[in-house]
Amino acid sequence: MSTVYLNGQFVPKGEAMISVEDRGFLFGDGIYEVVRVVEGKLFTWDAHATRMAQGLDGLRIDRTGTDSATLKAVCERLIADNGLASGEGTIYLQVSRGAATRVHHFPPAGTKTTIYAAPAAFKVNTAMRTHGAKGITHPDQRWARCDLKTVNLLGPVLARQAAAEAGAYEAIMHRDGMITEGAATNCFAVIDGVLRTAPLTNYILPGITRGILLEIVRAHGMRCEERPFTLRELPFVDELFVCGTTTDVQAIVTLDEKPIGHGAVGPITATLRDALAARLYAH
Ligand code: PDD
């Protein structure tokens, strides 16, 4: 059984217990991160730690015990104790506002947050990365603070379920006719040879992978506009891909059962997929 971290203790997963009054459980009142581990090393740790701090501040959750160095040490111990020093894995981190009598407003000052971290094994779906995946379109039914990585994920849960029922990997979500992002990924299109992705607003998560890809785009002298694209444009884009910590760069080659472009992984997507892989495995 794997070892997890809960509120200062490293314990077997089956022994980790939280209160039924935990606000993460009752309200989805918390923030999470998923960090990739490659050959025992945390990939882009600083960016994840920064986003988690911003998310906690965004929800006004006390950050005690969640500074970057402390959480990094927790993750490193989990990597060592769970055999993740080689191969690939992920670490899931979650901080909730803690356990207290159920009232909607914040619990009394001094209520301790619940800090949880757990490892998971991870294996890249090489065939899907190479040949592309199916996607569907789905309404974006989330709240208006999608920039915060909250544990309440009902919009993505329903969207991903719709994708799963359609035999697809990801749901590309749209709000007011604009493409926002995937259920658990950011989304890029290639339109007339130029990359396009939604700008950073409160309606999308500022993805770490998205940020790395924009760096790669600049380094390769490629063009990318951070400008919305529409649901109407989507069937006619040349290339479409989604990206994220466990998704890397994943081409979407059919959308709602119709081919995107030639129905195969496009050249710009392949370049970015390979450049990201080079960074991931550069250790
Ligand atoms: N999801 N957009 C949403 C809504 C996400 O949930 C995620 C990540 C991303 C990509 O962000 P990043 O590149 O920082 O992983 C974009 C994680 C992996 C998850 O929920 O499991």
Image (cartoon, helix red, strand yellow):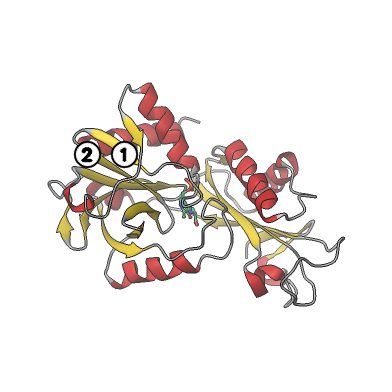
- Residue 168: x and y in percent read 28, 63
Q: Position of residue 74 (x, y in %)?
A: 71, 48
Residue receiving disc 2: 191
Q: Which residue lies furthest to the right in this view?
A: 110
Single out the residue that lies furthest toward the left: 262
- Residue in view at x 45 percent, y 41 percent: 209
Separation of residues labelled 1 and 2 (CA atoms): 7 Å
- Toward which corner of the image does residue 280 lie, by quadrant? top left
The residue carrying pointer 1 sits among few (fewer than 14), some (14 to 19) or many (20 or more) residues within 10 Å by Cα, namely many
In the structure shown, which secondary structural element does the residue marked by tag 2 occupy? strand
| Disc 1 residue type (three-letter) | Arg
Foreground residue among 100 and 81:
100
From the image, tell me which residue sits under label 1.
Answer: 196
Q: Residues within 10 Å of mark 2 (few under 14, many from 20)?
A: some
Which residue occupies the foreground of this view, 233 or 36?
233
Please state if 31 lies on the left or on the right of 173 as rendered. Answer: right
Kind of residue sitting beneath label 2 = Ile
Is residue 130 or residue 203 the one in the foreground?
A: 203
Helix, strand, or loop for circle 1?
Answer: strand
**Is residue 92 visible in this depiction of the protein?**
no
In this rendering, would 41 be left or right of 253? right
Callout count: 2
Q: Which of marks 1 and 2 is nearer the N terminus?
A: 2
Image position, residue 126 (x, y; %):
32, 49
Mark 1 near ligand 1 (CB under 8 Å)?
no
Residue at the location (21% across, 35% down)?
Answer: 267
On the image, the x and y values in percent for residue 105 come to 74, 69
User: Dots 1 and 2: beta carbons under 8 Å?
Assistant: yes
Residue 197 visible to the viewer: yes
Vertical placement of residue 92 versus 104, above or below: above
